[in-house]
Image: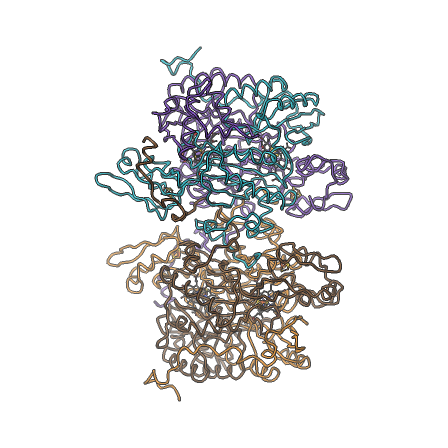
Chain colours: A orange, B cyan, C brown, D purple
Amino acid sequence: MPFDPSDLMKDRLTDIGPPKYDRFFPPVIKDNYGKWKYHEILQPGVLVHVSETGAEVYTVRVGACRLVSVDLIRDICDIADKHCGGYVRWTTRNNIEFMVDDKSKLQPLIDDLKSRGNWFPLGGTGACVTNIVHTQGWVHCHTPAIDASGIVKSVMDELFDYFGSHKLPAQVRISLACCLNMCGAVHCSDIAILGVHRKPPFVEHERVQNVCEIPLVIAACPTAAIKPKKVGEYKSVEINNARCMFCGNCYTMCPALPIANQDGDGVALWVGGKVSNSRTAPKFSKLAVPYIPNEPPRWPTVVQTIKKILDTYASDARRYERMAEWIDRIGWERFFEKTGLEFRFEHIDDYRLAMTTWRTTTQFKF
Amino acid sequence: MPFDPSDLMKDRLTDIGPPKYDRFFPPVIKDNYGKWKYHEILQPGVLVHVSETGAEVYTVRVGACRLVSVDLIRDICDIADKHCGGYVRWTTRNNIEFMVDDKSKLQPLIDDLKSRGNWFPLGGTGACVTNIVHTQGWVHCHTPAIDASGIVKSVMDELFDYFGSHKLPAQVRISLACCLNMCGAVHCSDIAILGVHRKPPFVEHERVQNVCEIPLVIAACPTAAIKPKKVGEYKSVEINNARCMFCGNCYTMCPALPIANQDGDGVALWVGGKVSNSRTAPKFSKLAVPYIPNEPPRWPTVVQTIKKILDTYASDARRYERMAEWIDRIGWERFFEKTGLEFRFEHIDDYRLAMTTWRTTTQFKF
Amino acid sequence: MALKHATPLLDELEKGPWPSFVADIKRMAAKSAMCEDLLGQLELSYEEKEGHWKHGGIVGVFGYGGGVIGRYSDRPDLFPKVAHFHTLRVNQPASKFYSTEILRKLCDLWEARGSGLTNMHGSTGDIILLGTTTDQLEPIFYELTHQLGMDLGGSGSNLRTPSCCIGKARCEWSCLNTQDITYDLTMTYQDELHRPMFPYKFKFKTSGCPNDCVAAIARADCSIIGTWRDKIRIDQDAVRAYVGGELVPNGGAHGTENRALDIQEEVIRKCPTRCMQWDGKTLKIRDEECTRCMHCINVMPRALKPGEDTGATILVGAKAPILEGAQMSSVVIPFMKMEPPYEEFKSFVEKMWDWWMENGKNRERLGELIQRLGMKAFLKATELQPDPRMINTPRYNPYIFYDPADVPGGWEHDAEGYRKRHQA
Amino acid sequence: MALKHATPLLDELEKGPWPSFVADIKRMAAKSAMCEDLLGQLELSYEEKEGHWKHGGIVGVFGYGGGVIGRYSDRPDLFPKVAHFHTLRVNQPASKFYSTEILRKLCDLWEARGSGLTNMHGSTGDIILLGTTTDQLEPIFYELTHQLGMDLGGSGSNLRTPSCCIGKARCEWSCLNTQDITYDLTMTYQDELHRPMFPYKFKFKTSGCPNDCVAAIARADCSIIGTWRDKIRIDQDAVRAYVGGELVPNGGAHGTENRALDIQEEVIRKCPTRCMQWDGKTLKIRDEECTRCMHCINVMPRALKPGEDTGATILVGAKAPILEGAQMSSVVIPFMKMEPPYEEFKSFVEKMWDWWMENGKNRERLGELIQRLGMKAFLKATELQPDPRMINTPRYNPYIFYDPADVPGGWEHDAEGYRKRHQA
Ligand code: SRM
Ligand code: SRM
Ligand code: SRM
Ligand code: SRM
Ligand code: SF4
Ligand code: SF4
Ligand code: SF4
Ligand code: SF4
Ligand code: SF4
Ligand code: SF4
Ligand code: SF4
Ligand code: SF4
């Protein structure tokens, strides 16, 4: 029965939830669920997992934009139909995985992928730079300080070699979030690209009382920089600029407090976060570069700075050392020295837990 | 000219400062200032320092109460006159050091010290429990939750063997402070003994306005638990007991808020602090036992608990491992298991920086 | 075919070896006016270095409080086709396996009723259908449920779409059935997912082992991470084969060429607890000291395996920085068996939610509430006992909120008795 | 001779091998009624488990705002001789060397005019004269200055008595003339020491090397710790002698018997930066990686020595927990040469004090003010440049207070231009 716009409740289905996961498992996955014995990376982007039953599954992982058209998905379906029995999956970092259950099917799949221009680059496995987790940017969100997809594209073009190889000391996870809300969970990434504002919001006094709930706006400010204020006839608010740290939270609550600004906005870079519990505990990313201006379309300074950090790491870190572990070993003073990045006031924390970040020991390197 | 009570200003000397340090240097110290080449501990409590000039100074370190009478100081002077050319010094941890400039003078000095009952026990060097840094307690202060000297005496009696030997994995620094003001700087000690209150102050409404400055009292409370309150005719204050964490700061400002209480007060024990930068950075002491009742005159539970912690450490830690370093290696879960101490809600931080102390990793031991 | 708006800046992003979203959108733009205007607006943003979207109004499907993000252009004069450009979040199947059949249906639906652009996937895990108009929302929902058997995911102050790593489906290390946990929670809590009832958003993420391939510890209010409490299983022959250079270390992650593993340097010394020994023939692990960090297993996947007494470590409170700063999740249940129907876990979840709903302020994440009221309050509410595994370090400040129940006479003083003993 | 009060509880503290303060006080009590009553009152505290001292009133010597702590018994009815029991803090000579001559004079003075009880020494470093009456304060001060050439130390909201480790007087590792620094600061800042002018107390402590034997980093608002910036000096023969068992490791601190040093285990692997190598013959240190922790030097005092280009690391902000929780000092000047008259250092100190006095609230320690206003404000006020050596880690929260001077147009927006580009 088709949708009947005049009767919303007719046949209405709600709360059916997602399809059950195993509905879309390829047979080799279903049959060997929980029976996998070991895996091996055969070449960058190509994995084999071997089951206790003797079954094998070959996975080809390819990089992908996260912003994809239905036409591209259809291309993906074509490939999956041709080689993979009609199944495909996405990884937690937005790469695409094509799986085949027999070695003989592997090379034809790879050949097919490689024949399709640069749409399906193999890689994203092992000690590589895998796909960049990112957010909406100027494509869809209302609070971004930067674009997302464009920066990701520019960075991945430059780091392309690292995507399809295992040349790095360990895996390097890069993430991007276009504002301090950090939808990309960039706060625990080896390298994080973050959109930042640098001007306090301005107040459109004539609009505030119409479009915002003033008490909620006031409560939204983490530093209590916002106070109610009467401006002429208007109930409005006032911002203590000196207390503002540009989080944009007030703008999220109130569109009459625009914060975006072509001169103020740009990129901050962060390093040394990790998520895995391997060897060392998960860690937050720390500030590396407080500000780089927006340089569309290809953000060359951002790209080159990341490249410099990555190259320094690649040549200086030891095997298995994640970015964080490398910095822990050499010390922040050496990190700044070796990367040539400037250490500035902004690097010294002055928020809630600041005192836990200061150096309370005479141990440091000259 | 003697003091003339009728004319305070007559001959008045002010701001003359302390005697210049080198006035009291024994000759061997003066002559070899800055020329020392190396030292060696000859036996517990006995050190030799050798100068580039070839000169030597032998130091005999003895334990001492910090609360000393002038008669005892005179005994000390007798010894110093007899053996040390009339010089003596105290260490930063209140031990006494007798120095002689020739090996031949050493044994007579030691013999003399040993002949004087238990007044001058040799020790306090190397991997030992040295003297306990402590504060006033019931002997002089107005805010203590415990006595100081009596607990120190009881603990040192029990740990006496560790004072005059080098049997521990590393040096163990024990400190005591009789209230949260922590005059003993116990916050960075291997083992800290801290006097704690557990009842919020009570308010003597009739007295408050006479003896206290109410705004200062209110400002003194770190948790904003105190509010002004009118009680009958009296301007007074009210305490939100649920917010009180028993710091006693309001009582310091206002004697009409007594906090001491025989049932409430007692001892908390802390472990794993250090000050030196050797190997690892300085560290705060962490809560080991939230509360042990006051048990004068000899605080057996406190003494036995410290003994248990120390013995566990002594048998389990590796050479050079300070208490903190040992716990870092084995983990807090093992610390509580091995010492048999109970892990309680009080151990989980709930103050300002609490979130930085939680376990944000799956790494732990079962 | 020339597009409506010239995009000289965006065109630069068609260059280079990485797949180009611009090239992809342009392809769609040839048949979608929405895509054409989207490109135009994006080009404008590239020129001006400012976004051009307004706050989303409240749009959605009937009876649901989330799943749709409203979005409007602030230049409808220039880009009328994206005047409305709402997003739908479609709940992905756990760990994102698809049949081409369902994907094609989704593509057809979305090409007909939306921009034809998607995110595969959103950061939370949903399939994001990017850009449609208000009038299309109900038809899309109808077709989604009826023809695809799919439903919307979460947004707003409710449960967000749970997600998980690939787990037992293709990973030898998984200690959990991550998909089943995710599916079960999603189905059990459909109401919480679709109808805002919480102070703020709430996320579950499940990883099968401490490698945490879904980054649960960084971004889930409740992180479920697989672990084991018995011994690492060792195949000594395989260990020797690694040392002998017959097997590729780390499953080839550091180069797929055969090379002899320097077991001392690469494994023993990297073990955070130093609980392993290698005498040239046999690898010994003092499992009671092991913190199950996975490193040795990662490096020798054919020799080592997690134990067999598996379950989960439950951690809570992760979130992004708004308002109080970012948090990672903290251990609150060191170990819990996870077998369907997950009663013990759900009973924990419900106690946690009750406490949060009762005490949480508007827009206060669980982690922030725990910060504000203290871990003890959380543990009491969820009936958990304190455990040193919950902390990296016991408190180092002396500001202890002693429980009056433990103090003789509680908070009361005998004021009179005191003044008998002490003159004022 | 029987004392006035029976002290059955205190008598228990005469037992045991450690020196007994009770036995000592009893000895004095035989000739001092103050000591008798002190024992009596202390016994009462032991019975009741509560102290018996009242808040100190404001007592002192003329023209000084500190140096005396007032103290009154709350049971003068029972213990009249300690009805007043004030304390004097006498500024110790740096590192606490004494001639017996001066000590005997002090004893005589104090037996005549006080209880005859002292603390050798107070936690800050002063000689504490424990217990006298108000009328004795001026005579004591007069005799102290005239006959002993000594002066009072600090108390209240002023500079407190500086103190230091034994340093070059008897320690081979000292990179500073700790006594001279301490003496010079004490003399230069007599006014600040004696007349309250600060928001709260302020402490200097000086240690000659990073072993920090005066615990400066834990308890001084300004901690001066000796260090060097060239290379550790190595005597390779002596290293070999340690390894060969000819020299006692760690100067005997771990047992005075000769034993061969396991240099790998005891030194190389304990080095926090792993910057040392030992090939069986020669010890190599990559000094540029060394963090000067002292461990290797401590373990091989006859083989290793600090470098020759010595100076101090300056750290600020340590304090006990009242109010904001305890702090350790933080590095603000990684390296500074320390030569008399210490002009550079004093100019730093004065800038620091000016800032604190201008901005500090009543009872706000320097460390708390830095917490409240931020390290940047402190560094700006003291004209120091940011340096990664000041931090353990750069900020991990994105809440950056950008300097408007760095932003084109500062904090201003072109509101009109914005609304031309963006419709509301
Ligand atoms: C496919 C995927 C899971 C999924 O459900 O989609 C996955 C799959 C595997 N991960 Fe992962 N990980 C995946 C995201 C992650 C993440 C999450 C993230 O990056 O957002 C992490 C945490 C990253 C972090 O710490 O910041 C992650 C940390 C690991 C680690 C730990 C590495 C370390 O030393 O820290 C391993 C072990 C290893 O690589 O040796 C691992 C190992 C593996 C193994 C070998 C597991 C197995 O036996 O199959 C899989 C192939 C590894 C490879 O690609 O080299 N996986 N892995 C994810 C692929 C993402 C991608 O497309 O690039
Ligand atoms: C005499 C004294 C300095 C003074 O000015 O009075 C002193 C003197 C020496 N210290 Fe110390 N330290 C003295 C208090 C300290 C303190 C401060 C404290 O405890 O309050 C510390 C920091 C303690 C901490 O970290 O909590 C301290 C940490 C050290 C260390 C570092 C040990 C470590 O591994 O952490 C060494 C090096 C060593 O012992 O190998 C050291 C080494 C030394 C040497 C060997 C220095 C030398 O070459 O002469 C001296 C004799 C050591 C011994 O007693 O075994 N000294 N030493 C202090 C004696 C106190 C006492 O009576 O017990
Ligand atoms: C679409 C998505 C980004 C993406 O491109 O992938 C997204 C987009 C938005 N997020 Fe998010 N968040 C998305 C995943 C996340 C994540 C990652 C995750 O879930 O794993 C986080 C970090 C983890 C967390 O929950 O803390 C995240 C943390 C936030 C926050 C900060 C919350 C906080 O407590 O710190 C906000 C601000 C807010 O809630 O007001 C936010 C708010 C928003 C809003 C609704 C903007 C707003 O202020 O109202 C964005 C709508 C964008 C749009 O126009 O479509 N979003 N957001 C992700 C959801 C897709 C999906 O359902 O799969
Ligand atoms: C006498 C002495 C303890 C001792 O027995 O050694 C002492 C005794 C008192 N201290 Fe202290 N402090 C003493 C060294 C310390 C130290 C250690 C140090 O200086 O190295 C500290 C910790 C370091 C620091 O400065 O933070 C210390 C931290 C405090 C505090 C907490 C200050 C804070 O900011 O956290 C207070 C409370 C206050 O100032 O209100 C305090 C307050 C007090 C008062 C004045 C009580 C009060 O609340 O007014 C005590 C008077 C006791 C009495 O009746 O004589 N005392 N006080 C020490 C001074 C002797 C001397 O001059 O040599
Ligand atoms: S990070 Fe900020 S701008 Fe980007 S999608 Fe999330 S809320 Fe929007
Ligand atoms: S941007 Fe953030 S800090 Fe600034 S006023 Fe708005 S809410 Fe406050
Ligand atoms: S620690 Fe407390 S009770 Fe003890 S001397 Fe210091 S202020 Fe007084
Ligand atoms: S004891 Fe401390 S926390 Fe309690 S009311 Fe007094 S000042 Fe506040
Ligand atoms: S988290 Fe563990 S179980 Fe899940 S995919 Fe990663 S390695 Fe496998
Ligand atoms: S899992 Fe980690 S902690 Fe356990 S033995 Fe392996 S490397 Fe060591
Ligand atoms: S701090 Fe250093 S210089 Fe001073 S006494 Fe201790 S070891 Fe010697
Ligand atoms: S001083 Fe410390 S860091 Fe430097 S070489 Fe010696 S042990 Fe290593």
Rendered location of residue D177, percent (x, y): 59, 29
Q: Residue at x 40, y 64 (%)?
A: C353
On the image, the x and y values in percent for residue B119 come to: 57, 25
Q: Can residue B78 be seen in this view?
A: yes
Pick the residue in front: C364 or D5: D5
- Does C246 sit left or right of C291 as displayed? right
Residue positioned 26% across, 59% down in the render: A234
Quarter in which the C terminus of chain C is drawn = top left
Along the viewing direction, whichever of B345 and C262 lies nearer the viewer: B345
B187 vs A263: above or below: above
Vertical placement of residue D404 versus D42, above or below: below
The quarter of the image that holds ligand 2 is: top right
The one of A207 and B110 positioned closer to us in this rendering: B110
Classify residue D295 by image quadrant. top right
Residue D186 visible within the image: no
Compared across the picture, whether C268 is left or right of C55 comes to: right
Pick out the residue farthest to the top.
B1
Name the residue at the bottom extreme. A1
Picture quadrant where residue A304 is located: bottom right
